[in-house]
Image: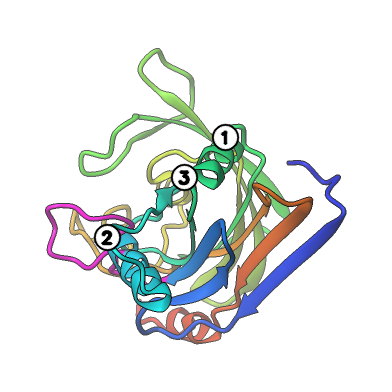
């Protein structure tokens, strides 16, 4: 990721467990808190989606006639909460999409997982099936039909039956964090898809997109958007196993 920008902007908030809200906004960007249970964009599912909410927010705030442009530059799974970034201009969308593709965006998650986690920072690599049908499978070695997934995990807090870890993504594969943590023997709390409770589709799991750091698409700045999530922390700290 580029670190040569002259200044930095930081936005931090304590996330409620309620509806979406705006974390950061300027002429080119809109970052919101996406609640668990919300989709990133519209689909055939009846679940609400963050893109529709964000377009309605902009249309109402700025009294915009007609359709509101909003560029999708990354996604969060439906049961995952946290920072979700959109572009408000085509230039912003193009440049941010390239930042995500070239892995220059710092993507940090927090996850409550079952079991014990070794102290310190650990690099994790796995090879995944490219589609979630309904979930991805993890393999130790590369294959012609598999995609490489990379991330690091670092223990933040260890309790008797669960741990809080920080996850830094190297790649952005479908269900990567959920699958790799489960493969390590530490499934995310509430994640029945990759845990031991069958193939249900949970509405909420103990995974939050905690921080995004990226180069502003039109300014000589780094932007950091952070969700502290104190209520989220307590919710999963006491989640019954």
**Mark 1 surroundings within 10 Å by alpha-carbon count, few (fewer than 14), some (14 through 19), many (20 or more):** some
The label on residue 207 is none
**Mark 2 surroundings within 10 Å by alpha-carbon count, few (fewer than 14), some (14 through 19), many (20 or more):** few
The label on residue 66 is 2
Query: Could you say which quadrant of the image residue 108 lies in?
Result: bottom right
Q: Give the structural element (helix, strand or loop) at label 3.
A: helix
Comparing labels 3 and 2, the label whose residue is closer to the camera:
2
User: What is the CA distance from the residue labelled 1 to the residue labelled 2?
Assistant: 28 Å
Q: Which residue is mark 3?
A: 180
In which quadrant is the N terminus drawn?
A: top right
> Does residue 112 appear in this view?
no
Comparing labels 1 and 2, the label whose residue is closer to the camera:
2
Q: Please check the rendered image and state whether residue 47 is part of the magenta-colored stretch, yes or no.
A: yes
Q: Of the residues under marks 1 and 2, which one precedes in the sequence? A: 2
**Mark 3 surroundings within 10 Å by alpha-carbon count, few (fewer than 14), some (14 through 19), many (20 or more):** many
Q: Of the residues under marks 3 and 2, which one precedes in the sequence? A: 2
Residue drawn at (64%, 46%) of the image = 105
Where residue 92 appears, x then y in whole percent? 55, 46
User: What is the CA distance from the residue labelled 3 to the residue labelled 2?
Assistant: 43 Å
Where residue 136 appears, x then y in whole percent? 32, 38
> Does residue 21 appear in this view?
yes
Residue drawn at (29%, 60%) of the image = 39
Q: Which residue is mark 1?
A: 98
Front residue of 113 and 101:
101
Residue drawn at (34%, 58%) of the image = 68
């Amino acid at each position: 990721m580029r670190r040569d920008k002259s200044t930095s902007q930081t936005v931090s908030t304590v996330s409620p467990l309620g509806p979406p809200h705006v974390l950061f906004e300027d002429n080119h960007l809109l970052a919101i808190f996406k609640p668990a249970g919300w989709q990133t964009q519209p689909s055939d599912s009846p679940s609400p989606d963050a893109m529709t909410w964000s377009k309605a927010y902009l249309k109402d705030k700025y009294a915009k006639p007609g359709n509101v442009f909003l560029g999708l530059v990354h996604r969060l799974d439906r049961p995952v909460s946290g920072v979700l970034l959109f572009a408000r201009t085509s230039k912003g969308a193009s440049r941010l999409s390239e930042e995500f593709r070239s892995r220059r965006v710092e993507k940090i998650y927090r996850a409550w997982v079952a079991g014990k986690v070794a102290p310190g920072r650990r690099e994790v690599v796995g090879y995944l099936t490219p589609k979630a049908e309904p979930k991805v499978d993890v393999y130790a070695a590369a294959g012609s039909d598999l995609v490489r997934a990379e991330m690091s995990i670092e223990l933040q807090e260890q309790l008797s039956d669960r741990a809080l870890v920080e996850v830094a993504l190297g790649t952005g594969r479908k269900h990567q964090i959920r699958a790799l943590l489960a493969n390590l023997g530490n499934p995310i709390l509430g994640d029945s898809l990759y845990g031991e409770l069958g193939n249900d589709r949970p509405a909420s799991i103990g995974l939050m997109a905690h921080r995004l750091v990226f180069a502003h698409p039109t300014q000589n700045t780094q932007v950091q958007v952070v969700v502290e999530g104190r209520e989220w922390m307590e919710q999963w700290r006491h989640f019954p196993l």
